[in-house]
Image (spheres, rainbow, N blue to C red):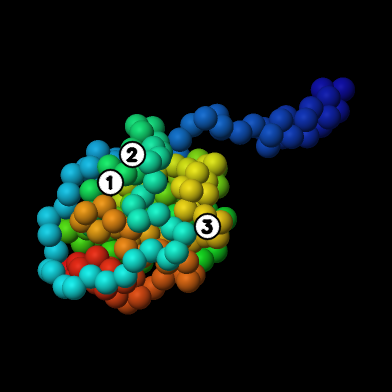
Amino acid sequence: MTRRFLALLLPLLLATAACTTDDPQSEPSGPPPFADCAALTAAPATGVPVDPTGNPPPGVPATLPDLALPCFTDGAAVALDGLSGPAVVNLWASWCAPCRRELPAFQRLAERSAGTLHVVGVNSRDGREAARSIGLDFGLTFPTLADPEEQLSRQLGRNALPLTLFVDGQGRLRHLDSSGALDDATLTGLVRQHLGVVPG
């Protein structure tokens, strides 16, 4: 009788154990992705000067919109029109394949140009956990803002991702790129051409 009872009880215990999950609110182990956003309102040091060229396309504002987005790390509001350039602002999402292809190039740009150029991510139309997972997978350390309702892209009149904005030292939007996934060479060339900065 006891053996028969145990034989019936064992599958039930195994099924219960298989359904047990960790606390869904718990954070994955390891360092969090993305840097805080506190330094974004302080101008970086000047890079090697060249002659910047380019202007935003017709219909695109000459400066970043009067819009505040929360920093991914602590939720502090960051006013985009207070961002001190030169800066490269990349709008991306975890579900966007070209975004995932180019994110490592933006991370390398951030590492090479620390102190001369701000590299800023804007996670758009995305869930927080999905964005965090991509940040951890790719080792992203540049500051990132959260824009789940895609306010920035709507104000710019664009709805495709990825989208990259080049903002000069005077806060002017010098170029808007929506050509697809950018590689290291193309990204470096655009920074040099439109912002007058040569990344290290």
Q: In which quadrant of the rendered view does residue 27 lie?
A: top left
Q: Which residue is mark 1?
A: 83
Query: How much space separates mark 1 and mark 2, taking CA atoms?
Result: 7 Å
Q: Is residue 188 above or below residue 162?
A: below
Q: Decide which of 5, 53 is in the foreground and name it.
A: 53
The C terminus lies in which quarter of the figure? bottom left
Quadrant housing residue 113: bottom left
Q: Which residue is mark 3?
A: 158
- Taking 102 as reference, is 157 left or right? right
Asked where in the image residue 35 lies, by quadrant, the reply is top left
Q: Position of residue 67 (x, y in %)?
A: 40, 40
Q: Position of residue 103 (x, y in %)?
A: 41, 61
Q: Nearer the viewer, residue 58 or 131?
A: 58
Instruction: Say whether marks 1 and 2 touch (CB < 8 Å).
Output: yes
Q: Classify mark 1: residues with Cα within 10 Å, few (<14), some (14-19) or many (20+).
A: many
Task: State the mark number for residue 79.
Answer: 2
Say how many tags the image has: 3
